[in-house]
Amino acid sequence: MPDQPTPAPTALPRVLSLVQPTADSLHLGNYLGALRQFVDLQHSVDGFFGVADLHALNELPEPAVLRERTRRTAAQMIAAGLDPEKSTIFVQSHIPAHTQLTWVLDCYTGFGQASRMTQFKDKSAKRGFDSTNLGLFTYPVLMAADILIYKATRVPVGEDQRQHLELTRDLAERFNARFGETFPVPEPHILASVGKIQDLQNPEAKMSKSATSPAGVVELLEDPKKNAKKFKSAVTDSGTEIRFDEENKPGVSNLLRILAAFTGRSIPELEAEFAGKMYGHLKVAVADAVNDTLAPIRERALALLAEGTELDRILAEGAEKAEAVAQATVREVYDRVGLLAR
Ligand code: ATP
Ligand code: LTN
């Protein structure tokens, strides 16, 4: 029998996202806003998911701490369900092409446009003029290079990254207009149902790795009993009614949103179930639902970190796959902008 021709591979949409290694553990907001979406998407896309260690460098971390957090972040991404057989999982600094493309894009980014980035304005105001480095200023251009170098068409992120995505889209359009079609213009992939997960102690603020107190931050690598305690002491609102009302009941609404995300049930269903019950009942239900999902993720992540070689092997394989794509884009871009071939 003659050999069957191999069917041409169908081009799946290319999806990319990176997470910064800025803490020892990721938190519930990172899980719902980012990791869980990566895991859900990976079956139907060509996914590239990485650890943004070059971005984290602008906070000037201790070298040993940055290295450890980079491994921890990668381990949590895999433990949450990213499958190295399906997705390319890599560390940003392993692919020098990211910084090569950043320089080219830097030259096509206006000073004024970069100055208008709200994250830069907030963080530089907090740090003060003398402690603000150029890395913080060009941070969004490195992020644009991360995306464009893989010619990604969709980028799953939390709401806070929307403005950086807009800059990336502008840069792609500007480059294509001057040098011919090179980059697809990427779309943000932001889940409205997740929105922003808020801090349990301060439901007006988003849950964040850089929160001033750990009491309101539910960490993936935390002992489940400690996380259950954090839910039990979550700030709720005056009154007793369990109802979704973000303006007047931000604490209860945040808990309902988390419970809906972990159980797959709708907010109205949950409101009906908890009608007449006390805040304490809701807190126990949320803690149980969260721990059912997070406890096995924590165990897998800690096992990967303790074992050692498996994680390094996954990251080395990911780097090889990512590098092949990234280098090809840089060669194409260098040629288009007029850099002399070697
Ligand atoms: P930092 O406090 O260091 O800025 P962070 O907790 O905001 O960190 P990042 O590493 O910047 O975390 O974000 C990783 C991903 O998680 C991004 O896609 C971001 O949009 C998403 N994310 C972060 N915090 C939340 C949150 N509270 N709710 C939903 N998504 C979030
Ligand atoms: N800036 C992002 C992290 C990040 C990223 C990216 C996200 C760096 N490069 C590329 C999506 C695509 C953050 O702070 N969460």
Image (tube, helix red, strand yellow):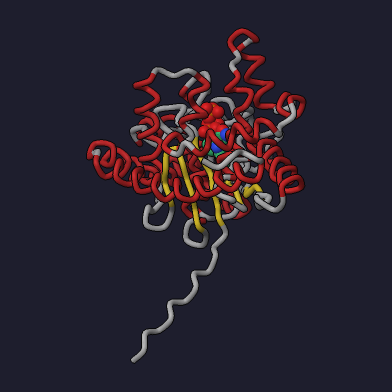
Q: Residue at x 58, y 10 (%)?
A: 131
Picture layout, residue 78 above or below residue 212: below
Q: Residue at x 68, y 37 (%)?
A: 246
Q: Quadrant of ligand 1?
A: top right
Q: Quadrant location of residue 255?
A: top right
Picture layout, residue 214 above or below residue 41: above
State the residue in front, 255 or 104. 104
Residue 63 point in image, percent of width and height: 38, 20
Residue 215 point in image, percent of width and height: 47, 24
Q: Residue at x 39, y 28 (%)?
A: 24
Residue 325 point in image, percent of width and height: 49, 50
- Is residue 230 toward the left or the right of residue 145 in the image? left
- Is residue 278 toward the left or the right of residue 289 in the image? right
Residue 235 point in image, percent of width and height: 55, 28
Picture layout, residue 203 above or below residue 183: above
Q: Quadrant location of residue 232?
A: top left
Tell which residue pokes out farthest to the top in this image: 130
